Amino acid sequence: MAFLATIGISAALFLQAWSLEHTTVTNFTMISSLSTFAVMLLSLMIIGEKLSKDKIIGVAIAFAGLALITTNGRFELSAQLKGDIIALTSAFFWALYTVMGKKISEKYSALTVLSYVFLFASIEFLPFYLMSPHTSMFEFTPLTWESLGFLTICCSLIAFLVYNFSLDKLSASTVAMTIYITPLSGVFLGAVLLGESFTAYTLVGSLLIITGLYKAESKSICTYRRSVPLDT
């Protein structure tokens, strides 16, 4: 669990923030999504999880859709390769966290894993907090506290709990595909909350992501439907 805390929270989140100082948000988003492919490879090597051809094709289609949404049809290489390499390392650590989280979920509950992972991560981050310059919490405004509360409860505790719980019920590669839901959520919330418009690339990219997700899990869905008895 200390290892999970190190690779999944301490290392992965630190590398994410560091990479954004040296590369574009577009490149970071696309490179981070490569963690799904890394999860497939690692799950095959470490836990012997079988991969179907449909899942591989579905992930590739979803990745193409994400690329269209994030680049809006215009992809530009980052001026500094350093940031892209850091982002790729972060994606690998997150993939390793997913696979090892799947392995440990066979023995411990999601809540148990999450409790210890966050405990170890807090201990690991504490020295950096004490040694680095930071704003005193006594200077925080009410809005700052509200924002921190939302990030802590919704984006950290609940999000990680749901993710770990999913690892207990689903394959690692299936859970990893949820990364492609992020751009769809961003597009939807951007339109509803910010009044942002849909471009042709956004629409096509969204359709590709939905198609890819369905392609990857279509056999699982059909198997589930056949396993559910019909009411008579």
Image: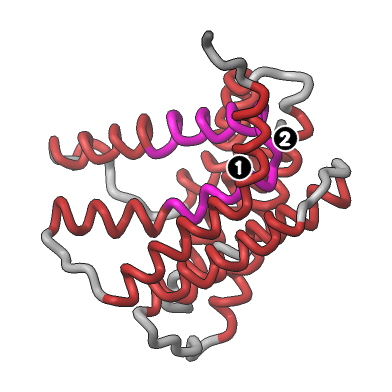
Q: Quadrant of residue 86?
A: bottom right
Label 2 sits on a secondary structure element that is: helix
Decide: marks 2, 1 in contact (CB < 8 A)? Answer: yes
Q: Quadrant of residue 156?
A: top left
Q: CA distance from mark 2 to mark 1?
A: 10 Å
Residue at the outermost front position: 232
Q: Position of residue 56 (x, y in %)?
A: 70, 60
Question: Which residue is at 52% across, 72% downward?
Answer: 64
Q: Position of residue 144 (x, y in %)?
A: 20, 41
Give the answer, above or below, for where 84 lies relative to 139.
below
Give the answer, above or below, for where 190 lies relative to 146.
below
Mark 1 Cα-neighbour bin, 10 Å: few <14, some 14–19, many ≥20 = many
Magenta region: 155-181
In the rendered image, residue 121 lying in the magenta stretch gets the answer no
Comparing labels 2 and 1, the label whose residue is closer to the camera: 1
Numbered circles on residues, count:
2
Give the answer, above or below, for where 138 lies relative to 129.
above
Give the answer, above or below, for where 101 lies relative to 207.
above
Question: Which residue is at 60% across, 29% downward?
Answer: 225
Question: In the image shown, does 195 or 118 lie closer to the viewer?
Answer: 195
Question: Which residue is at 47% across, 60% downward?
Answer: 209
User: What residue sits right under mark 1 in the picture?
Assistant: 175
Residue type beneath disc 1: Val
